[in-house]
Every structure is written in C-alpha cells, then in structure tokens.
Image: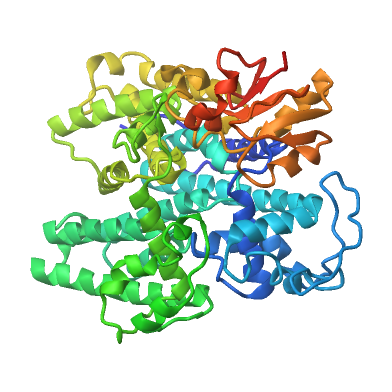
Amino acid sequence: MPAKGPAKGDWRRHLIALALLMLCGALLWTSERGRTLTADEPLHLVRGHALWWTHSSHLSYAHPPLANAITSLPYAGRGDEAWGAGAKPDGQPRPPARVSERRPSAAATHAEAFERLPGWDVAQPLSVSTAYFRHDFGVARAELTGARRMMMLWTLALGLFIYCWSERRWGWSAAIVSLALFCLHPTLLAHGRLVTTDMPLAATAFASLAALIAWIERPGWAQVGLFGLATTAMALSKHSGLAFVVVMSLIVLGAALLGRGGFAQQRGGRARRVGLVFGQLTLVAVVMIFVIDAAYMFDRVGLSVAEILAEPEPHNWISKRHDYQLLERSPIAALPESWRLPFPYTWLVGLATVSEQNGAGHGRYFFGMRAAPGNPLYFPVMLFAKSPTGLLILLGFGAGLVVARVRAGVRPSVATTVLALFAALTLASACASKINIGVRHVLPLIVILVVLAGRAGQLLVEAAADPGSPGVPSWLGAGRRGPALVLSCVLASAVGAAWTFPAWLGDFNLLVGGPAGGHRISVIGEDWGQDLGDLAELAEAEGWEQVAYHTTFPLRREELESRGLKVRKIGCKKPYRGPDPVVIHLSDWARRHSCFTWLDGREPAHVVNHHLLVFETE
C-alpha cells in the first residue's frame, strides 16, 4: 500500500516545498554577497550586453546566446544610455580622457561605445569584458550582481520543476526529498548563483529528459513538440547540449525499436515505429536549426564552405595557437567548397573552438599531481567527491532496492530507466573528455542524481509502510527505519551545506575529507577567483594596506582595489623582497609550483577558503 503522508488533495503539503524554495533563495542570496567575480563571469555578461545593445551575436561563439541574453535582460534598455566618463575601482571619477577612433567619448551611448572597445573588431570577449569593467568597475560589478540574481531565479525555477515533475510521477515523498536534496546541494547552490551557462544547461537538460520520458510513455505529436522545444533551448544554452540531443535521440529510437513504453501499444511493425520516430526527430532538427539561426540573428547563415573558410575567425587563446584558422582544421574543411551550410558562421566557429579545446586538453591537475590531459577517472571521482554523503547513501540504498525489486519481478519504470541510461551514456562520454576543469561540466548529472535519490527516498518510505511488498528486505520493513534513514540523509546534507557556507565552490563531502581532502583531488574548478572578498576582510583585520599579488587573470586587481586594498602585481619566478604579504592562488601554486621555488620551505601564514595562500614577509 502507498506510504502514509499528506493526502493527495491536501494543498498544505506544498507549503513545505514552498518553504524549501524560500530557503534555497535565501541561501543563494546570502551566500552570493561578498563572492567576487569569477574567471568567466565578465565574459558571459558582455556577451549578453552585446546581444541587447548592439544586436550582434559575434561574441557568442564559445557559448550559444540564450543563457547570456536572459542574465543580461535587466539591462536590455541600457544601450541608449550615455557611456559616461567612468570611474576607478575605488569609485573616484576618472580624469577626462582624449577621445580617439578607438576610445569612446563620454557622450556616446553604451551601444556605440561597446563597438569601440578593444577586442570588439576581432570578437575577443576577454578584451571587451576587461575594457568594459575597467571603464567603470562599480557599475559593471553591480550589473554582474543583477545578472546573478537572474541566475538565482533560473535555479529556483529548476527546483520547482523538479518538485512538480517528481510529485506528479512518484508522489509527494519523492518530490519533497528531491527538492530538499536540490536546495541543500553545495555544488548546485554554488553554480546556481553564478553568471555562466552551466545551470541553464542543467535546467534545460532535465526539462528535455522529462519531455523525452513523456514521449516514450505516450508517443504523440504533443510530446514531440515539447521535446523539440526543450532540446532547442538546451542546444542554445551550451554547445554540449547538442551532444545531449544526440544521446536523447538514440534513446527514443531505441525505445521505438524495442517496443518499450507506449511504443508497445502502437500499431504497425518495428520498422514503422522507428521510421515515424526518425521522421519526427528530423522535423525537430529542422526547427532547431531555424531557431539557432534566428538566435544568431541570421548573421552569416547559408555561406558556402569556401566563404566560411575565407571569413576572418574570432581571436581567443585557443585559436591563437593555430593562427586563427580553426575551421581549416575542422571537418568543414573536408566538405566540397560549393556546399552551403544552413548554420550561423559564429555557431560553427564555436563548435570548432570547443572541439579544439577538448583535443588539446584543459586542466591537468588531478589527485595532487600535474597529470596528462583528460583523465578518464576525473568526472566519476568528482561526482562522488562533490555529492553530499547523505545523497550517496540514499543512492546506494536505492540501487539495492532496485536490484531486489528486479529479482522479485518488478521492472524499473520508464522514467528511472531513461534517467539512468542517459546518465550512464553521458558519464561515459565525459570520461573521454580532456576538459577537466571542474564538475560543473557534468552538472546535469548532479540534477539526475538528486532526482534518483529522491525516488530512492520514496521507495524507502514505502518499504516501511508496506513491508510485504516485492523486493523489500525484512530489516527495512521493521519499525520506521526507512523514513528515519531518509530524514537522516536529508539532515546530513543540511549539515554539510552549513559546514562550508558560503564557500560552496570548494565543497567536498566528508568521505574524501571535506574541502581539505578534496583539494588534493582537484583545485582548477574550485579556485575560480571567488574568494577575494574574504581576502580583503583578512587584510582589514590584519591592518594590511597593500598586498603583493600574483594572478594571470584580469580584473582581480580591480576587485581588490574596489574593496580598499592596494595591490602590487608580481610575477612568479622573480622573488619578491618587499614588505607586503604575498598572495598566491592555490590553482597557480599547484599547476606552476616551479615558478615559486623562492617560497620553498615556507608555510603560508593564512589560507583563505583553501584557495588563497598568504605568505608574510620574513
């Protein structure tokens, strides 16, 4: 019999979900305060601004435009406002600058000034974002905060969708456990407040999976339409979304081939089922291509292969290695020159850029050593280390229950099968990736683990209510062990989130030793520049007016100066003999330790959030 709990028609049960969402919003809001800008956020912000102000998508090659357009939406109308004279990071006005062909005047609009910033002509978002923030750091920083608020809304919307979807499919117990685990997951909270494309991809990927499951269970054109809508949004959020579309297409084709779900009741033979699904997927692809073209404002769509190869490519650190000729190294170069491709030029450059980045490898620090690019164990280990211990316990018990139920003749549902199959295929693909710069690149898998853990929690609760049901171990049906275990796992997740608040980017679970042990596994995706506010607070407490700071990223000096701390930038090989404390990022220390041999034998006097090493002068 079903587990006892709030009656299905009792709306009051949803108040607990509302309270959890309010808690999630409060955690996102309060933990964001003081978090300084991370490495990629300024680039995402200026891409969104460029879309709204200049109606140009030529900066949106590293990432498709949808997520950036939404986070910049609060400032969509600012393009007609005056550029102004600007201000220094400390808020002091800048002296009048000489107006030149490449320097915007104070009277120019934001849209006009944007097109005159360094890097605009060669589509280099790093240069554009650096110039934009340095013009008036305070204003740009406030815009970034507003964009983060938009990302928080996206995160809360995903949490609400998970709750509604799980409640409708498996009942209230599964929904409330899933939502609780979502709202208390440090990694989801960390990325749910940052202006990147990782959370939008996770949200649209789960929506696409929900549409895929509905299609398999009830084949029909309405389900095809929902699948097309969700997957198009996914492909427009991040380039890896396109790979997810392929995986999901293979899953639905396999379901049609094997006659699973609603396909078992369809008339006609196997060939007819597969042919119909293939035709529907083709239609989805055609619509998706058109929407992608529209999102890029039909800029350079339909060029011939020869024209594509003749276009000057955008400048970035990846294309620079190949004299800005990435497309010549891509499969496009092998096509007949006369062929015309129905894709935006900028989007094609983006795919070539990501492919080259993966081929070359990015991020080589793994388990305390500088490793070869692309360790196949990176993402499995990171998923384990970044998952709260309570969530892992629920998944372990859930897997055991599923095996016991299968042995008792109870097959997993279509939803469980699709989620598990997609997660397995995606993880296998991630193991082949050479881009190992953080668990954020498999964030959709974390969402799936949360939902499956919620389903496991529901099975444990039902096992206690109906100990005679198939596949329920006798020890689990005794007393209230199942509900007690579920509650303990949720509370353990809450304790874990409180333990590392608000520094959740560097969170690792208790099983790997917490943040102290986890940073022997990975530092590249954890030390992202977000801790400079805490460094400024330490400087104020210690009475430091200036620090000697090593970094290779722009705008971090401005971030510290905006908080009243003077900065002397230093290199890594030349010893610093001045009186100021020396600050080095753990990511630089781990990857380029040979640069800092002049500090060998010295221990940092302070370590800020496991990421900033502070050496005081002797």
Instruction: State the image coordinates of residue 128 (x, y, percent, origin top left).
Output: 65, 61
Residue 260 sits in quarter: bottom left
> In the image shown, does 263 or 249 lie closer to the viewer?
249
Q: Give the camera-side residue of 29 and 303.
A: 303
Q: Nearer the viewer, residue 618 or 250?
A: 618
Residue depicted at x 81% and y 37% = 563
Q: Quadrant of the N terminus?
A: top left
Q: In this view, does 604 lie to the left or right of 403?
A: right
Q: In this view, does 147 lie above or below 57?
A: above
Q: Which residue is drawn at 39% across and 63% down?
A: 351
| Depth check, front residue: 52 or 312 | 312
Please, is residue 336 above or below residue 61 in the view? below
Q: Can residue 165 be spotted in the picture? A: yes
Q: Is residue 208 visible?
A: no
Q: Where is residue 192 in the image (x, y as percent from the top left)?
A: 57, 43
The image position of residue 156, as x and y in percent, is 58, 46
Quadrant including the C terminus: top right
Q: Please indicate whether residue 367 sits to the left or right of residue 110 in the image.
A: left
Q: Residue at x 75, y 74 (%)?
A: 112
Picture residue at 50% right of the left edge, 27% below the top: 594
Q: Quadrant of residue 438?
A: top left
